[in-house]
Image (spheres, rainbow, N blue to C red):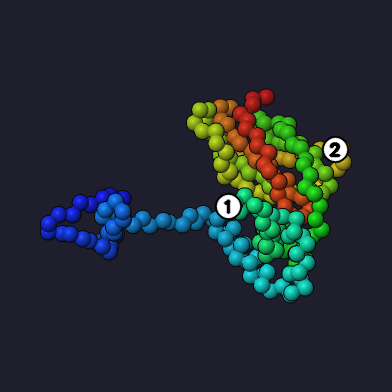
Amino acid sequence: MALLNTGAIITDIRGRVNGHSFSRNGFGHTIQTKVIHHRKSSSKQQRQRELVKYITQSWLNLTIAEQNTWDPFASNFSFRNKFNAPVPSPKNVVYNITNQNYFNANGSLLTNAPVYDNYQSGSIFPTAHSVSAQTMKFSAFSPPVFTCLQIGISPPFVNGQQNKFKSKISIYYPLTPVIGSPQIIDLSSLWWSQYPFATPDNLVWFSFRWVNANSWVGSPTLYGTYFLLP
């Protein structure tokens, strides 16, 4: 934004000319150039937008009785407004968020609300990362309440280039929990098919979010690791 000091010939100017808007505020005349924001439209974002539209429409197709089943479930969730006061989450919003996770994990939608249970935490740790053997495995210990893991994997970063996590691969990995025994999660073929030229100095970030039986997702567990030669 620029300020204009008008003279004897031009004393005032308002409106828009060739993409530039002229106005006046308490500091004087101003000029602003209109910026056209392009909406990001990667294939992943397009799929997510279509899913949100699909779930929003499905809510309108529910019967009143089916919608009312979401009242007690939604009462367990709230957000804070600008005054930092807790506000109950609307049931249609809870329906949408729940079904986004549920659809990504199961390929279908929940019509009636699930039974609410308190969120529990699982544990996961790396077991094998090797360049020459092309392995990328994790061991997951999960309580029975979990149905899947939401996993994000970054592209390879050269040492010193970047270490901020940014997911390029995002999947839902089904879980078959066994009490006391880990489930081995092998991400090797998926990752190497996208980035076949990784080297030992490449840093890779992994994000794991536990999805429970309610289809709600917890906070991410992040791992940043360099590939290791065996």
Residue 191 in the image, given as x and y percentages of width and height: 62, 41
Question: Which quadrant of the structure image shows residue 93?
Answer: bottom right
| Dot in front, 1 or 2 | 1
Residue 69 in the image, given as x and y percentages of width and height: 78, 67
Q: Does residue 107 show up? A: no
Q: Which residue shows up at 21% across the image and 60% down it?
A: 12
Q: Which residue is mark 2?
A: 181
Q: Which residue shows up at 49% across the image and 31% down it?
A: 161
Q: Residues within 10 Å of mark 2 (few under 14, many from 20)?
A: few
Badge count: 2
Question: In this image, 177 relative to 165: left or right?
Answer: right
Q: Which residue is mark 1?
A: 82
Residue 49 or 155: which is nearer the viewer? Answer: 49
Q: Is residue 149 above or below residue 56?
A: above
Question: Which quadrant of the structure image shows residue 45?
Answer: bottom right
Residue 161 or 99: which is nearer the viewer? Answer: 99
Residue 176 or 76: which is nearer the viewer? Answer: 76
